[in-house]
Amino acid sequence: MKKVPRREFIRNASFAAIAASAGLAAGCGSEQNHSSHSVITGKKFEWKMVTAWPPHFPLLGEYAEQLAVWIDKMSNGKLKIQVYGGGELVPPFEAFDAVSQGIAEMGHTAAYYWSGKVPAAQFFASVPFGMNTQQVNAWIYHGGGQQLWDEVYAPFNLIAMPAGNTGGQMGGWFKKEINSVSDIRGLKWRMAGLGGKVITKAGATSILSPAGELYTNLERGVIDALEWVGPYHDYLMGFQDIAKYYYHPSWQEPTAILELMINKSAFNQLDEELQNIVRYAAAAANVMMLSGFESKNGEYYKKIKDEGEVEFRQFPDDVMRLFKEKADEVFMELMASDAMSKKVYESYVKFRKSVSDWNDLTERFYFDF
């Protein structure tokens, strides 16, 4: 590789930064860009966004609503979005079809809810024993993940992008202790996505319930256990009142991406400025939601511990080994049965390998002190 002189490197970097800043300003509708096509035509849009979350749901629903506010302000009112909680316009798990068919132009959801329709979509939510949050963001933004996501959703007249992340989660709430693999068998366990397939192979029954039904289902015995997010959400949901054991780690969701789905035909009607505004607002939500979860989970983890009614437990080693074994089986079967899943997973694994050594060098030592 040709060595670039230091001064030339700095000069080139400066020019690149200036160009990037100019592009960002143009995309976000700065005052210097008021001659854009959307302003000249005066065309305005009124869209609907459906979500998988109850109305005004902490962080998840709040940032769906904040997305709409940011887009409205950055577009000077040219793109207004009415946000509907799950069940207000369509049921939570029907958002995919609603946006695909144009009933709503947008959806704020999690991609693993569509595993029955689009198996490869699950990799754009969370992967058991997979990458952490910063790694998966790097894959999507810089490692080809976004292009693959576009390819996966294209047949459904959809595009999607990250618009939030919970960060690392907990393993779940249980009414009884998990001491060995035998305690997994027969459990009715609320779990979505690839993790749900793993526990099914391990002998449990995977049940998918929307957020608004989780407390009642656990209380009434419709489910024996559940995983949701982490201490902040889980405490507000009241799970600590009906389940004594809170398990970690979150092998099933080491990170969890929230997606902004957009009807592709509707998106193509927007000019470049408005499209960029949508993309930048989604990226902002991705960062801000993650920061909110990180802050609140630390606070509520301490709160749950201090109240002393809940026992924090770690999954036994034999249980973790079983989950890892079954996860590998799920991946192999999925790749064998679905060509698009194979393509996405191979990209995911390749990128993970490319960053793991660097992450070990720069970050793992923190956990040894």
Image: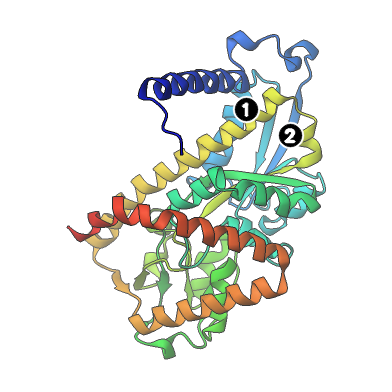
Q: Which residue is mark 2?
A: 47
Q: Residues within 10 Å of mark 2 (few under 14, many from 20)?
A: some
Q: Position of residue 122 (x, y in %)?
A: 61, 61
Residue depicted at 62% across the width and 53% down the height: 52
Q: Work out whether residue 18 or residue 304 is closer to the camera in this orientation and state it.
A: 18
Q: Work out whether residue 368 or residue 283 is closer to the camera in this orientation and state it.
A: 368
**Left or right: 301 in relation to 153:** left
Q: Residue furthest bottom?
A: 182
C-alpha separation, residue under disc 1 versus residue under disc 2? 14 Å
Residue 37 versus residue 356 in the image, above or below = above
Q: Residue furthest left?
A: 369
Q: Secondary structure at mark 1?
A: helix
| Labels 1, 2: front one | 1
Mark 2: amino acid: Trp
Q: Secondary structure at mark 2?
A: strand
Residue 16 versus residue 284 in the image, above or below = above
Q: Residues within 10 Å of mark 1 (few under 14, many from 20)?
A: many
Residue 333 versus residue 302 in the image, above or below = below
What is the quadrant of the C terminus in the image?
Answer: bottom left
Residue depicted at 39% across the width and 72% down the height: 243
Residue 227 visible (yes or no): yes
**Left or right: 150 in relation to 162:** right
Residue depicted at 75% across the width and 47% down the height: 158
Mark 1: amino acid: Ile
Q: Which residue is mark 1?
A: 277
Q: Earlier in the sequence, mark 1 or mark 2?
A: 2
Residue 57 visible (yes or no): no
